[in-house]
Amino acid sequence: MEKRCDWLTNEEIYIEYHDKEWGVPVYDDHKLFEMLILEGSQAGLSWITILKRRETYRKAYDNYDPEKMAKWNGEKINRLLKDPGIIRNKLKVAAAKQNAQTYLEVVKEYGSFKDFIWSFVNAKPIKNSWKSVCEIPTTTKESDAMSKALKKKGFKFVGSTICYAFMQAVGMVNDHITTCIRYDEIKNL
């Protein structure tokens, strides 16, 4: 039987996410922005809760078009707060708009979001070798630095724990356990 990371449930959507996405390095600005928004939406919830709503979020959040999201008005925000397909948290929805505005400023300043965000790991993934999920930290000095910098720029819902989960998701760190079927695949990317 193939061994996977212990945090997985038996839900097919979760297994597919683990096997195809989690930990794979992402260098596309749009995808990085989407994942940052989704990780912020997850705050206080389980990732599976967000993963099951991912497609609804895409539609509701204008396919993560930061230009459109940055211009959300009160009417749009009120519609979002009535959408049962997303987490209807006023602060998180407002943060998505704020984060889109800030994202556009970062892209203007750095030329790309990728260049800014990957700078926290010197532009290359950190390759960990955890034997158990119990060893995996929830924050690191890199996630602390990222959180501090993102907050300073004006991003919301970007605490160090959220930043570390984001780093794991977009492959800035390889936190697959060493016995996981994905560990070597990700390590060798």
Image (spheres, rainbow, N blue to C red):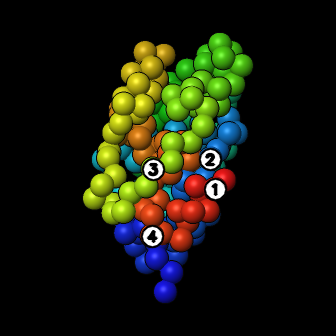
Q: Give the crowd class for mark 3: few <14, some 14-19, many >=20 residues within 10 Å.
A: some
Give the Cα distance between marks 1 and 4. Answer: 15 Å
Q: Nearer the viewer, residue 18 or 136?
A: 136
Residue 162, given in percent of the width and then of the height, sits at 39, 40
Q: Amino acid at mark 3?
A: Asn
Per the model, the C-alpha gap separating discs 2 and 4 is 20 Å
Residue at numbered disc 3: 128
* Tags 2 and 3 touching, CB below 8 Å: no
Q: Which residue is mark 1?
A: 188
Towards the viewer: 108 or 125: 125
Q: Which mark is residue 25?
A: 2
| Residue 173: % across, % down | 50, 45
> Marks 1 and 2, how far apart in space?
11 Å
Give the labeled residue for mark 4: 179
Q: Earlier in the sequence, mark 1 or mark 2?
A: 2
Residue 170 numbered mark, or none: none
Which badge, 2 or 3, is on the more N-terminal residue? Answer: 2
Q: Nearer the viewer, residue 117 or 60?
A: 117
Q: Residues within 10 Å of mark 1 (few under 14, many from 20)?
A: few
